Amino acid sequence: MAVRRGSGEGSIFREGERWVAVVTVTSATGRQERRKRRARTYGEARTKLRELQRDLAAGVSPERVTVANFFTRWLDRQRASGKSPNTIANYEWAISRPGHPWMPT
């Protein structure tokens, strides 16, 4: 017999070949949003569900990452990793090419 979780406890289900841990949260605007984490095994999904629940209980609200934010942070990590200036310049060129509206100017 399946065990039914209480309200706000989240859920784990199979999606294709992956397991998905989901928690529904209410945003600051009052809108409900689903936070998902995918895993290869049920055990990993259970661990990720606990992490989501712990973060939400602690008041950590996972931010939505835009492509521009992702690339900005990624470039900062690449610079800090000691890559050559030419490599960094190539990365910057590839990301900020015309027709790619996601990079801030």
Image: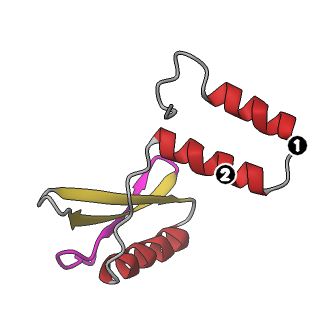
Residue 15 placement, left or right of 75: left
Residue 4 image offset from top left, x and y in percent: 22, 76
Residue 79: image x %, image y %?
Answer: 75, 50
The one nearer the camera, 90 or 53, is 90
Q: How many marks?
A: 2
98 inside magenta stretch = no
Q: Which amino acid does label 2 sit on?
A: Asp
> What residue sits 62% from the left and 30% below the top?
95
Magenta residue check for 8 = yes
The answer to whether 66 is drawn above or below residue 14 in the figure is above
Please tell me which residue lies in front, 46 or 65.
65
- Binning the other alpha carbons within 10 Å of mark 2 as few (below 14), some (14 to 19) or many (20 upward) gives few
Whether residue 91 sits left or right of residue 35 in the image: it is right
Can you identify the residue that label 1 sits on?
84
Could you say whether the residue bearing mark 1 is in a helix, strand or loop? loop
Q: Give the range drawn in magenta.
A: 1-17
Give, as a three-letter code, the residue at label 1. Answer: Ser
Q: Name the residue: 76% across, 57% down.
A: 80
Horizontal side, residue 95 vs residue 19: left or right: right
